[in-house]
Image (cartoon, rainbow, N blue to C red):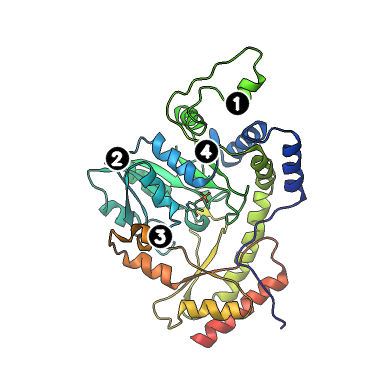
């Protein structure tokens, strides 16, 4: 077999997105405008939420979610350490403290460990639908209700994923998505907050635009002179119309993208099911994933060194990534001197395999062949 070169991920962008960005530029309306509004309406319809508010990225969206939840100095928010570090950072932006809990084998926050971390300062639980697989929203909602806490969902990876028959974004009042190119759909950078609460939606729109009482577009279209005010200290967390133009087409493609990703994931699952020493991702009965990533875990019996496995695969042209990292191990949080043994084990023993659209039959077969051979050789 000749050597191929296979990336771990690649955004799907077509001529429609390019044309739409082109048209947005030529319209001369390049910051938040009509295309942002259309993207928001389409996104709210797609996930089944009352409101969708576009923001510059998921991290700024999560910051706004903290502010909407009135989280501030002295508060604690429980979140997984094993997540992209923005999950924890947004809590710090609000002046509060991220309290790290363990995740389970599905990389999602562990309900019982979360329960054990609840204290008098706990104000919210920030669950993450890691690599697109829905967390146990009902379990966490019940826990929040029991302790009078606010539930926030970091759905950065989870556009199009489904929990108990409804899409992520429709289950709770503060859900935030990402459109970074590493996610299933992209606007370059971009994010979206979904909520069912009118007050949250209104304040999010205010805060993302400097706290301004009237948005640029309304002022631009007004027949009478409008004098704006700034009602509180806000931020510039806007998405641009150029990005939204791309997002509108990405969202159209999302169901198809998920179908294509699922086909590749199914091929991996069936090809690897009898390989020794590995644990494959599994999707609970009551949900579906968008397969943002396909992460394989080396089990405790396996003597394979994960980094060596990554290197030998790269030598054969197959790019992989280590699994999701732990925030408490990053230098930014290392001074807290914490240990989360299970999350650390998962980080050290998981590997993310290539999965993108379009991935040719030949490329899928090549990854399957290389991964199978190396697992067997190193076992
Ligand atoms: C990607 C990601 C983020 C950050 O998203 P941006 O849009 O890049 O700000 C936050 N949380 C999780 C879980 C992510 O995967």
Q: CA distance from mark 3 to mark 1?
A: 39 Å
Dot 3: within a 10 Å radius of its alpha carbon, few (fewer than 14), some, or many (20 or more) residues? many
- Taking the view exactly as shown, the residue that stands out farthest to the bottom is 377
Total number of numbered labels? 4
Disc 3 + disc 2, Cβ < 8 Å = no
- Is residue 88 depicted above or below 311 in this figure? above
Residue 28 is labelled as none
Q: Which circle's residue, 4 or 3, is located before the other in the chain? A: 3
Q: Is residue 371 visible?
A: no
Residue that carries the numbered disc 1 in the rendered image:
216
Residue 162 in percent (x, y) is at: 53, 49
Q: Earlier in the sequence, mark 1 or mark 2?
A: 2
Q: Mark 2 or mark 4: which comes first in sequence?
A: 2
| Residue that label 2 marks | 73
Between disc 4 and disc 3, the foreground one is 4
187 relative to 289 in the view: left or right:
right
**Mark 3–mark 2 distance (CA, rounded to whole Å):** 23 Å
Query: How far across and down, in percent of the image, does residue 254 sit?
Result: 65, 50
> To which residue does mark 4 refer?
237
Q: Cβ–Cβ below 8 Å for labels 1 and 2?
A: no
Choose between 196 and 250: the one closer to the eye. Answer: 250
Kindly state the secondary structure of the residue where label 1 is placed. helix
Q: Which residue sits furthest left?
A: 120
**Nearer the N terminus, badge 3 or badge 2?**
2
CB contact under 8 Å: marks 4 and 3? no
Q: Disc 3 vs disc 2: which is toward the camera?
A: 2
Q: Is residue 163 left or right of residue 123?
A: right
């Amino acid at each position: 077999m000749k050597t191929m070169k296979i990336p771990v991920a690649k955004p799907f962008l077509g001529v429609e997105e390019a044309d739409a960005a082109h048209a947005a530029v030529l319209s001369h309306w390049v910051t938040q405008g009509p295309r942002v509004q259309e993207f928001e309406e389409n996104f709210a319809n797609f996930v089944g939420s009352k409101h969708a508010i576009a923001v510059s990225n998921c991290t700024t969206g999560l910051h706004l979610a903290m502010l909407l939840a009135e989280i501030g100095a002295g508060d604690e928010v429980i979140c997984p350490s094993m997540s992209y570090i923005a999950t924890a950072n947004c809590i710090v932006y609000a002046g509060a403290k991220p309290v790290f809990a363990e995740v389970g084998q599905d990389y999602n926050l562990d309900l019982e460990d979360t329960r054990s971390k609840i204290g008098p300062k706990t104000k919210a639980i920030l669950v993450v639908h890691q690599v697109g697989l829905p967390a146990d929203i009902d379990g966490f909602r019940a826990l929040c209700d029991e302790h009078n806490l606010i539930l926030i969902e970091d759905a950065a990876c989870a556009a199009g994923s489904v929990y108990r028959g409804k899409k992520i974004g429709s289950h709770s009042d503060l859900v935030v998505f990402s459109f970074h190119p590493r996610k299933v759909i992209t606007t370059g950078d971009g994010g979206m907050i979904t909520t069912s609460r009118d007050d949250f939606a209104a304040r999010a729109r205010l805060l993302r635009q400097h706290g301004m009482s009237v948005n640029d577009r309304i002022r631009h279209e007004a027949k009478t002179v409008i004098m704006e005010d700034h009602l509180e200290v806000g931020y510039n967390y806007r998405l641009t119309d150029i990005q939204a133009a791309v997002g509108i087409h990405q969202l159209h493609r999302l169901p198809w993208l998920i179908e294509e990703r699922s086909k590749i994931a199914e091929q991996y699952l069936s090809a690897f099911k009898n390989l020794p020493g590995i644990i494959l991702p599994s999707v609970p009965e009551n949900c579906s994933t968008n397969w943002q990533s396909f992460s394989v875990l080396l089990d405790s019996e396996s003597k394979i060194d994960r980094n060596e496995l990554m290197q030998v695969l790269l030598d054969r042209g197959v790019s992989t990534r280590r699994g999701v990292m732990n925030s408490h191990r990053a230098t930014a949080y290392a001074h807290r001197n914490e240990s989360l043994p299970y999350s650390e084990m998962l980080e050290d023993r998981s590997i993310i395999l290539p999965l993108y659209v379009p991935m040719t039959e030949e490329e899928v077969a090549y990854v399957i062949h290389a991964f199978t051979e190396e697992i067997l050789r190193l076992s």
